[in-house]
Image: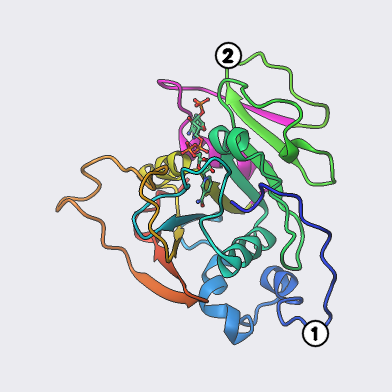
Amino acid sequence: MDDMVDTPARVIDVTDPWLPVPHRFRHANEPLPRTWDALYGPLRRGCVDDLMVVAQLGQSIDGRITTNGHQPTYINGAAGLDHLHRLRALVDAVVVGVGTAVSDDPQLTVRRVAGPNPARVVIDPRGRLGAAARLLRPDGARRIIVTGDGCRAAFADGVEVMHMALTAGMAAPSAILAGLRQKGFRRILIEGGARTISEFLAAGCLDRLHVMVAPMLVGAGQPSLCLPPGLSADGALRPPVKAHVLDGEVLFDIDLSARRLPL
Ligand SMILES: NC(=O)c1ccc[n+]([C@@H]2O[C@H](COP(=O)([O-])OP(=O)(O)OC[C@H]3O[C@@H](n4cnc5c(N)ncnc54)[C@H](OP(=O)(O)O)[C@@H]3O)[C@@H](O)[C@H]2O)c1
């Protein structure tokens, strides 16, 4: 999450090699420029159905996604944050859980790199998100709240609401994806927090997972992924993984397509 402070508008640098990538990613059949193809090429289309669902999480070496200081502190450095904004620029919709929306008040816009803003989706089964949340600001991007069938909260004008059946307070990730597909989204970024990503992973609803490990040890702080036991017969998943070093941070690009359930 990089959204805890307002940043000034970005000045477009016409020599920036990233500049053509978001358009080419969506519209051209040829590979992306080599610098970007290994990391972002696999996100162009899903291989299980017509969706491509990628999750990204930044964590410390000791597996924490937040620090425990009085002020929110970024886990990732500049390269990690640029990567997150590149992902946002490539997807149609970005999804967060209401825990993140309430604690960080993120904007979920593309500000560090060139590219279009995705639609913003928050999973808020009980209608906890206040109307002043920054991700609900009208700026031309679609804003969607996924909430429980019985939720009677009033949401801000222009915000689309997806009512979902809940089981033990939770909506099935596959049903959330089906609803987003119906709204026209094909590439979807699950941006956190750990609980939301864990639910999507456990439900077989991720094609890829990007875990960005920052070179720091945090001690106390919110833990990263927490998965139920029994994900595989021998007790561990061993998906294909590629590691990329981004300016001192290590990005694990994890291919989960073999356990992704088709919608
Ligand atoms: N390092 C990073 O990359 C990163 C990224 C994002 C966030 N964060 C940090 O993560 C923390 C928040 O993470 P978190 O794990 O506590 O919360 P979270 O995943 O942001 O939100 C969890 C909540 O969202 C709702 N939710 C999510 N999936 C749902 C589903 N399938 N069905 C129904 N409801 C669903 C539930 O709301 P209810 O509680 O209302 O039932 C759930 O408790 C923040 O401190 C934030 O700073 C870090």
Q: Residues within 10 Å of mark 2 (few under 14, many from 20)?
A: few
Residue at image location 53% in from the left, 60% down from the top: 76
**Residue 215, x across and y down, in percent:** 42, 66
Q: Is residue 49 left or right of residue 2?
A: left
Residue at image location 75% in from the left, 55% down from the top: 117
Q: Is residue 150 left or right of residue 233?
A: right
Circle 1 — which element? loop
The foreground one among 248 and 12 is: 248
The foreground one among 75 and 154 is: 75
**Residue 41, x across and y down, in percent:** 56, 74
Q: Looking at the image, tell me whether mark 2 or mark 1 is earlier in sequence order.
A: 1
Q: Residue furthest front?
A: 70
Q: Find out whether the residues at labels 2 and 1 contact each other: C-beta distance under 8 Å.
A: no
Q: Is residue 247 left or right of residue 187?
A: left
Pair 2/1: label in front: 1
Quarter of image, res 101: top right
**Residue 21, x across and y down, in percent:** 70, 75
Residue at image location 58% in from the left, 14% down from the top: 150
Where 193 sits versus 148, above or below? below
Q: Which residue is mark 2?
A: 150
Quarter of image, res 255: bottom left
- Amino acid under label 1? Thr
Asked whether 248 falls inside the magenta stretch, the response is: no
Which span of residues is magenta-colored?
A: 160-185
Figure colour scheme: rainbow
- Amino acid under label 2? Gly
**Which numbered circle lies on residue 15?**
1
